[in-house]
Image (cartoon, rainbow, N blue to C red):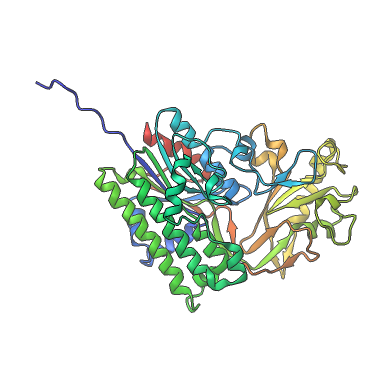
């Protein structure tokens, strides 16, 4: 006769994020044997094509993921935003997120999360567990909760991210920087894995940096750094394999493991400077020949752009020199969208789609965001610079983000047309 009922073992969930890895690339690296562990997961599970946020940048897409909502609800529309009633810019941070995250929700249920290198979580704030902020964290001491782990991270030489400023000046530093940051993140992974947790998340952001600086090394098999590119992904595949083996030792099923990216990637044909286009089309003008900021915008202007693809109408009662009346918004948005969709470069169509805010955002903060969000054809990287005079140009960057070529790899099939904000609920259901 059994006197004591055996307690049910707590289920665990593991999420690995690969920043900026496209569905098409992951499939290719799996098929060609570069990522053999991922190939096995694809064979036994389902690799979903995933839509990122709009705009398709990490600050917004990861916030969509962590909150299960869109910018109209969580309040983050980009890496920069306006100070209220001004053209002055500010950098939103984790404290500006208006709703609970996946880790907050789990914490309310008494479940503990360990989150390593999650972008858009600076400064780190209290969760039930451990939070180590990722990009754009600027100070390790404010990137750790609880603070008691700061000394341990310093001891292991934890480096938040690749020093992109150094790499821009000296491209030969890219590989040492990638190696150093990833090695330090692996040390943190090993250290915190041994602790008590229900939800574990580990994000690799060096993938995005590699793609921006050396996308051609992936596309061109004759590139002198092509093999180094593949070797980096083999290293990531080994990390995934190690995590899966550790799960097996814990008697956790692979159905509790999820792999995802926050946006896709492709090579750049041309950068497209939206403010130069708006100026040439008569929608925008400045009071200075060489504007220093949007404060130099003329009262004649009806629209302007912020990085990477956000167009704002110069609305009355919203901006100091605003002149667009509420009743004129619809017609003006349609006019800008119609003209943008006709933009070409050497006979190539540049703009794929122009979304109105009300089509893509839902929530009480929608009015604080852009009026239009532009999605380009692959290869045309949209920019919000106010200093460019020509519509098209190039910089040192080789790769650009894409919207609907992110991925979500899971043991189960969760259907087609998935968006990144749907994943939080899918993942949390595994911990019920």
Q: Residue at x 36, y 38 (%)?
A: 197
Residue nearer the viewer, 170 or 382 = 170
Q: Which residue is drawn at 76% across and 38% down?
A: 84
Residue nearer the viewer, 236 or 147 = 147
Tell me if 133 is positioned left or right of 374 in this view.
left
Q: Which residue is drawn at 52% across and 57% down?
A: 161
Tell me if 109 is positioned left or right of 284 in this view.
left
Residue nearer the viewer, 198 or 268 = 198
Q: In the rendered view of the protein, which quadrant contains the C terminus?
A: top left
Q: Compared with residue 233, is residue 15 higher up or lower down, i.e. above or below?
A: above
The x and y percentages for residue 292 are 81, 57
The x and y percentages for residue 19 are 50, 54
Q: In the rendered view of the protein, which quadrant contains the N terminus?
A: top left
The x and y percentages for residue 391 are 77, 64
Q: Compared with residue 164, is residue 353 higher up or lower down, i.e. above or below?
A: above
Q: Is residue 398 visible?
A: no
Q: Is residue 297 visible?
A: yes
Q: Which residue is drawn at 48% across and 35% down?
A: 127
The x and y percentages for residue 69 are 56, 37
How many callouts does the rendering have? 0
């Amino acid at each position: 006769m059994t006197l004591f009922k055996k307690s049910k073992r707590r289920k665990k969930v593991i999420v690995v994020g690969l920043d900026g890895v496209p569905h098409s690339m992951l499939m290719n690296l799996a098929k060609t044997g570069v990522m053999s562990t991922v190939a096995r997961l694809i064979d036994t599970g389902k690799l979903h094509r995933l839509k990122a946020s709009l705009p398709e940048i990490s600050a917004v897409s990861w916030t969509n993921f962590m909150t299960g909502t869109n910018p109209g609800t969580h309040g983050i529309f980009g890496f920069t935003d306006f100070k209220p009633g001004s053209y002055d810019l500010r950098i939103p941070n984790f404290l500006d997120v208006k709703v609970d995250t996946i880790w907050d929700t789990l914490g309310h249920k008494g479940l503990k999360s360990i989150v390593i290198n999650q972008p858009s979580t600076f400064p780190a704030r209290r969760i039930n567990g451990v939070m180590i902020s990722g990009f754009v964290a600027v100070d390790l001491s404010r990137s750790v909760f609880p603070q008691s782990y700061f000394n341990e991270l310093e001891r292991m030489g934890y480096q938040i991210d690749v020093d992109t400023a150094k790499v821009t000046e000296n491209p030969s530093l890219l590989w040492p920087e990638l190696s150093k940051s990833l090695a330090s993140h692996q040390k943190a992974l090993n250290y915190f894995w041994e602790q008590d947790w229900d939800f574990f998340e580990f994000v690799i952001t060096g993938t995005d940096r590699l793609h921006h600086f050396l996308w051609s090394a992936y596309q061109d098999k004759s590139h002198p750094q092509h093999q180094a590119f593949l070797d980096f992904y083999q290293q990531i595949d080994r990390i995934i394999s190690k995590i899966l083996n550790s799960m097996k030792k814990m008697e956790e099923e692979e159905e509790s493991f999820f792999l995802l990216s926050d946006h896709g990637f492709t090579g750049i044909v041309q950068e497209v400077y939206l403010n130069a286009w708006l100026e040439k089309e008569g929608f925008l003008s400045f009071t200075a020949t060489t504007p220093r900021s949007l404060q130099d915008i003329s009262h004649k202007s009806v629209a302007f752009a912020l990085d990477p693809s956000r167009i704002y109408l110069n609305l009355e009662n919203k901006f100091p020199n605003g002149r667009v009346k509420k009743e004129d918004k619809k017609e003006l948005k349609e006019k800008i969208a119609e003209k943008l969709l006709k933009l070409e470069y050497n006979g190539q169509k540049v703009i794929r789609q122009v979304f109105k805010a009300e089509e893509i955002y839902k929530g009480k903060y929608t009015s604080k965001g852009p009026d239009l969000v532009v999605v380009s054809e692959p290869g045309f990287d949209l920019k919000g610079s106010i200093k460019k005079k020509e519509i098209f140009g190039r910089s040192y960057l080789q790769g650009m983000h894409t919207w609907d070529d992110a991925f979500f790899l899971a043991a189960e099939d969760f259907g087609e047309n998935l968006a990144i904000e749907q994943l939080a609920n899918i993942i949390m259901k595994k911990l019920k």
